[in-house]
Image: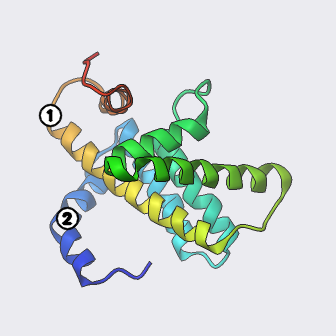
Amino acid sequence: INPDSDFYESIDEEFSTYANMVIHHNDRLFARLKSALNFFSRAINGADKILGFISYVIAIEAIFSRDKHTPIRITLAEYIALLCYPPEERVYIYKTVKKIYDARSALVHTGTIDIDHDLIEKTEKIAAKTILHTFKLYHRLNSSGEGKIEDRFFDHLRDLRLGGSFGG
């Protein structure tokens, strides 16, 4: 990704807010974000594109993986589409994330290392957008409400899934 100057201008104001969060927050949701940033950083700075691809997927899994009984492939696809994309793009992103997870599974479980370069680039962009939108939601949730922020984060995702805000 080669961001243009508009990208840097758009994040300039938010950057200090999020940078301060990295230093000052230590709750479970923020631990997920730190882990996601760690794996994203390894991917973007690494020379091995296949390991980078896996690291991008781990980054998004770190944010959304909570319940071992919930199917992660569908969960990632739904949460990312709902949290990060406008309604007109959600079906496409949902299908793309499932394709990404299928490629990840083939790599991990069968050793298949033939991953399309375009899919790796899409995965990088989706992971970056997912981390950014999670930071934004974290900031909103941290500024309002009571209770554990991680629970409120997953409640918010549940509400997005169900099409409303239902509280506890």
Classify residue 141 by image quadrant: top left
Helix, strand or loop at mark 2:
helix
Q: Which amino acid lies under the numbered mark 1 shown in the image of this protein?
A: Ser
- The quadrant the C terminus occupies is top left
Q: How many discs mark residues in the rendered view?
A: 2
**Looking at the rendering, which quadrant does residue 46 occupy?**
bottom right
In this image, 44 relative to 85: left or right?
right
Kind of residue sitting beneath label 2? Ser
Residue 81 horizontal/vertical position (percent): 42, 46
Crowd around label 1: few <14 · some 14–19 · many ≥20 (10 Å): few
Quadrant where the image shows the N terminus: bottom left
Percent position of residue 137, x then y: 27, 44
When the figure is inspected, residue 136 is found, relative to residue 162, above or below; the finding is below
In whole angstroms, how far apart are the C-alphas of marks 1 and 2? 20 Å
Q: Which residue is mark 2?
A: 16
x and y, in percent, of residue 68 in the image: 61, 27
**Residue in the picture at 47% in, 39% down:** 78
Residue identified by numbered label 1: 144
**Residue 104 placement: quadrant:** bottom right
